[in-house]
Each structure stands twice: as structure tokens, then as C-alpha cells.
Amino acid sequence: MAPITQRVLFCASMVLASSAFRVKPKKKQGGVFTEHVAKQDAGPEPMMVGPAGASTTAAGEAGQVDFVFTFGAPGGGSPALQNQRGSDPCFPGLRVWQTEPGRVWGKWLDVVTSLANVASYWHAYMDGMEQDTSRNRHWNYSCGAGLTKKPNHAFSTSTSLHDAELYIRTLEKRLSDPWLHNMSIFAGRKSYMDDINAVFREVKQYGWGLVGSSLHNGGGGVYGGAQVSHLIQEPHTLECTLTFQGTQALGGWLENINVPAKPFCGLTFKGESCSGSGTCTTKRPRGSFVHGGFKDRLMGMLKSSNFQSNILPFLSSCSRVYAVGHSLGGVVAELFAACASRAPKPGEFGYEDYKWMEWTKGTAAKLHYVDVE
């Protein structure tokens, strides 16, 4: 049997087995959720609103992501994605997943967060946080090899715990950080919006400006379905947030089942391959193969003319770059950050992927914002 076929059948068997898990019914939500706009600093010297105290990249160097914020995301690397620059394998960032205690014992778990683990795709190296949606508590985890396999302690999966709005509400209750609250809204709500006029108005109320958007039609096939990305900037600190959309259309869910491992962005040496079941092995230090479907989704967006004209040229003018996403958008944000950290040069293996997202860190500047009013 061909190696790829073995890997697909292995995942399919695990997905079928997971159907025996209980699926928690969705709860009816009462009332209307009101967005709370974070207060903007009115002083002459605005405070940093993001977690990165300084850019991880100096002017003139290949640009990279300064902070990754994801929630409800599946794993995407085999082995787990690692930061390729410096001595620290951990990406600056935070990955969040949701649980809820069982009525008698155990936990309910957001079903998507462990979905790809059955095919040995693991979460990226970064800090993590588990939040309990029913009680006022959460658990923080430091980056490490063990964390890349979490969550791995729940026997009951829940579709309702994957809801982006539930993540937003719970994060607001658990954390007092207005930046993370705003990022959860950008990642979980605005990242799904393809009405540019609406996105402009929505981000403006939080004090940010919409720089540009990219719409991708999904290629007319099953590769992820239609998707949208937005680049927004905070006009005082000049930091930028790049959003990636999660799975919404049927094509996107079909993409999640397309599991063959692929080389990506020079994270492996040329000629390396991964076959069979279990975690892939690589000869490159901190190397990884990636989920083929997730890679194809990211590359579809990067290669679109809208991304090349409306987003990529402006990353150089951001004081810091944040990549955010919910669900599939979260793991795509992690792949984007991993490729940026690798930054292969022209002629090196992997440059054929990287060239579609390559930017050089420049002098931070206030960009022109979309204005539809």
C-alpha cells in the first residue's frame, strides 16, 4: 500500500473511531453580547497595546511574526513546528483551547483542538492556556515539547466549545487584558467577514485602521473553501495584525481531511519525505513536515493577487506583526509564522514557498487606511 494511502486511511479510521465520543449539544445563549471597546491611551506617548515589548526583527532583516495568537486551532506540524531563529525554539505567542467539566467526571473538549493529533500533527511550540467555559478559572502552560501534544486529557469532544463567540466571551471574562480581548475579536469575528465596508467600521471602533484585505475563492475545489485575510494597524504604536479565516464552508472541512504530510518552506532538507503512520522524522534541526491541506490553504491565500497587492507590500511598515486566527485560521497563522522565521534565501530549498510572503523589516510608519465613509 502506498505510504500516503496508509496515512490517509489511518486518519480516517481514527476519525471514525472518534464518532463514538459523545458530542455535547450546543447551549442556547441568552441575551445579546455587547462588544466592549478597549480604551485607547489619550496621552501624547501612547502605551504599547500588544504583548511584544519590542520587535523581534531589526530594520533590514527578513521580517518575521512578533506574536502568534490562536484559539480553537488544530495541530499542523509533524514534528511540532519550532521557531527557526535564535536559540529559543518557542514562538512568541499564545494558543488557547476550551474545556468544560463533565457532569459526573472528566472534561468536555473543543473537538477541533485535538482533531489532527490522531494523524500525528502537533501544535506549535508556544505558550498555551486552557480556559474553563463554565467556571471562572484557567490554566497557563509554558512552552515545551509536552505542551505541543495538549490537549490530550479529555474523553468527550464538543462542537459547541469550538464556537468563536464563546471563545471571545470567555476570554473577556478570564483576562483583563484589552489587547487580547481585541485580538480575540479580530481573530474570531472580523477574520470571517468579507464585507470590506463592515470590517472597516468594526475595527475603527477599536481604534485600529484597516490597511487592506485579500479575498481568495478557494480555487473552485475542496482546498479550504473561500477565505479572507485582513491587515489592520494601530495608528499610534504602528503594530499590525494579520488575520486568517477559519473553516466555514464545506470545502474547508474537506480540506481538514486532506492529511498527507508535505515539506514546507525549507523546514526539512531537500529530498526528505514522510511516510506511514506516527510522527514524521527530519534531519534538519527543529525541522517539521506540515499538514498538506493546511499548507495548500495558506499558499492559496499568499499567491492570490489581492494578498500580493493589498497586504504584503505593507508589512515592512509595521512596528510589529501579529498573526491571529481561530480554528483553521489559527494553524494557518502558525504556518505563516514558521515560514517567516525560516526565511530561506533565493536558490535555497523552500524559497518557492517563502517568496510569496517575503518582506524586509523597514522603518515603522502609519499606513493609509481604507476609508469607505
Image (cartoon, rainbow, N blue to C red):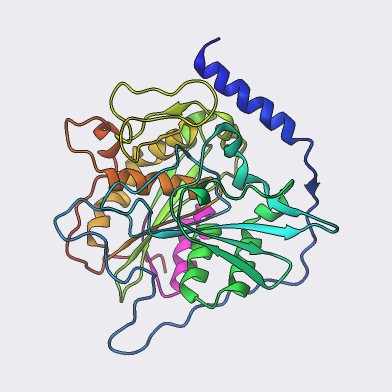
Q: Quadrant of the C terminus?
A: bottom left
Q: Reply yes or no: does residue 192 show up in magenta.
A: yes
The reply to whether the magenta stretch includes residue 373 is no
Residue for point 68% across, 64% down: 132
- Across and down, in percent, residue 256 comes to 57, 35
- Left or right of residue 292: residue 312: left
Residue nearer the viewer, 123 or 330:
123
Instruction: Tell me the quarter of the image containing the N terminus.
Output: top right
**265 relative position to 30: left or right:** left
Q: Residue furthest left?
A: 60
On the question of residue 245 being in view, the answer is no
Taking the spot 24% from the left edge, 53% from the top edge, the residue there is 63
Furthest residue toward top: 1
Is residue 352 placed above or below 104 in the rendered structure? Answer: above
Could you say which is closer to the camera, residue 308 or residue 280? 280
Picture quadrant where residue 161 is located: bottom right
Identify the residue at image location x=14%, y=56%: 60
Q: Which residues are magenta?
A: 190-212
Indicate the position of residue 233 as horizontal and vertical percent values. 35, 66
Q: Identify which residue is drawn at 67% across, 71% down.
A: 33
Location of residue 352 with respect to 84 vertically, above or below: above
